Image (cartoon, rainbow, N blue to C red):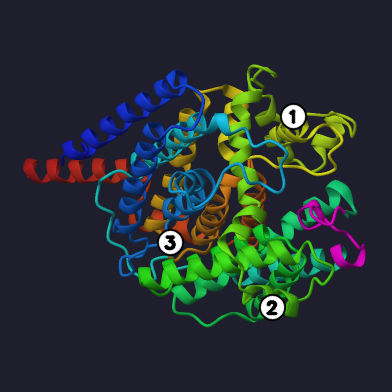
Amino acid sequence: MNRTRPIPHKMSLLGQALLLGCLTFALYAIPSGIDAYVAWPVIALFYIYFIRSFFATVRIRPDIPVYTTIETLFLMFYFLLFINPYQMHLLGWSDLRNNSFLPFVYEDGSNQALVASGIGFVAFHLGMSIATGSRPRPPTEANDAKEGQYYVGFGYIVLILLAGFILIYEGAGFQSADEGRYTKVTNGGAIADGIYLIITMLCIVGGSRAIALLAQRKSLEFPILLILPIIAFWSARILIHGDRNSFFLIAIAAGGGFFTFIRRTSWIALMACILASLVVYGAVETVRLSQDRSFSSLLEKVFEDRSNEEANRSSSFSITTATLRATFDIVPERLDYGYGKYKLIGFAGIVPLVRGLLLGSETRLTNTAEVLSNYMLGPNAGWSVGSNLLTDVYMDFGVIGIPTLLLLAGLFAGAIQKNAMLTPCSTRTIAFYLLVLGNFAELSRYTLDFPVRMLTWTFLLFKVYDLLMWMQGRARPDRSQRAKTQGTPANRAPRSTVTHLSLHADRQR
């Protein structure tokens, strides 16, 4: 059997690699400013990649074409932050200089920001193309997971943890930085932030178990029936409190999971969902700055008629867009590269509280959001402009960091997607796929290490559950099934030897 990949696929990868190299060189060579001859080719290139991603036939389950893929959702948010503002500006529909949040918008960094954006989405797509490959997927059945009763106890563990952490969070009066960012009222520090993140993670994992059961054509288990209203309560709570990003993490995982593993949807219905999400996104931004932070106030803002100019002026998207332009004014002229420092500190957050113990509370400029806020607003601004994916990798590793790390991010996302194709009904597979789907959809507005803690803690949760099952003498269903159908190399060799000896004995007779 020929195991080499088809020539067209290899040529496509080579072409993308050459394009990536040209864009990387252009980032060194282009002048400052905002020039149409730089902007429009990048904008047109984005549309080519996005249309290709949106209409490409991807099937995680063999019977369901998927429009809400990891790459498609990644590119949608990417477009809003890094592409659309310049398109609107060049068409005369908005002005980059109009920003009600920032005193200076670094307009001269627009060319560099656009080319860096081009490098980012080309590198991410190249990584996904390499990881997913062009080989046809093996045939799978809808119920290939064959999990049996293995994960019944898992639902009870998630229920206890989710309810317990919510009770601790509410009982202690905690308010994490995510929901207190705009009211400037927080309580609980790193402990509150950690618990808040764990609750979001457990909401996605609990929802993933429900989706896995429905994908396997099974009834929802008792603990899952209790988990779902808790997830709904928490989602509504954080939305009213102004944390739209965590809300959409849960919502994207739920909606994307339904349309990926249970029932197909049309691209028209998907577009309607996206438009509705943008309306809610903008309404929450207005409500969280007002005194009346209630569900009725949110509904009022959803149906309120606002002009495009006012929506653009007050949108926090424009802050993130400006941070990328500011990046090229700050580094390396005013501040040297981090050389991996920011990534090291970010990944250290996998271990709870370790960053605070190692760095101390008075340490400054330990992440790219702090660097941007310090230079864009001053050291005593009282609020943060946040960071973004491209700034985060550039500040650490310079121009070469953008194609390198975005390529690695694409490789990881592609590997998760390919694994989901192999076992599309597995609880474990669905949980990790939906965590990546939600986190990568919003990754453009965060740092590269943003999904690491949630993915790592979910991995440990499953490993602890596997240990409990092992202590009861129960093996993981995917491993036992693989052993039955494929066998290990060590097991196959003796059978081959026995067969050979038997045939030799027959010839001797």
Residue 150 seen from this side? no
Between residue 75 and residue 484, name the one nearer to us.
75
Label 3: few (<14), some (14–19) or many (≥20) C-alpha neighbours in 10 Å: many
Residue 383 as seen in the image, left or right of residue 204: right
| Coordinates of residue 475 in the picture (x, y in percent) | 54, 59
Q: Residue furthest right?
A: 172
Asked if residue 70 is positioned above or below residue 61 in the image, the reply reads above
Write down the residue under mark 1.
375
Write down the region rendered in magenta. 169-184
Work out whether mark 3 precedes mark 1 in sequence or the reverse, and give the earlier one. 3
Please state if 366 lies on the left or on the right of 508 as rendered. right
Amino acid on which disc 2 is placed: Glu
Secondary structure at badge 1 equals helix
Alpha carbons under labels 2 and 3: distance apart: 29 Å
Q: Nearer the viewer, residue 277 or 462?
A: 277
On the image, the x and y values in percent for residue 266 come to 35, 72
Q: Secondary structure at mark 2?
A: helix
How far from the left and from the top, in percent, is residue 140? Answer: 32, 63
On screen, residue 508 versus residue 416, left or right, reads left
Q: Which residue is mark 3?
A: 68
Amino acid at the residue labelled 1 = Tyr
Position in image of residue 403 (x %, y %): 46, 30
Judging by the rendered image, the residue that carries numbered circle 2 is 300
Q: Residue at x 21, y 36 (%)?
A: 4
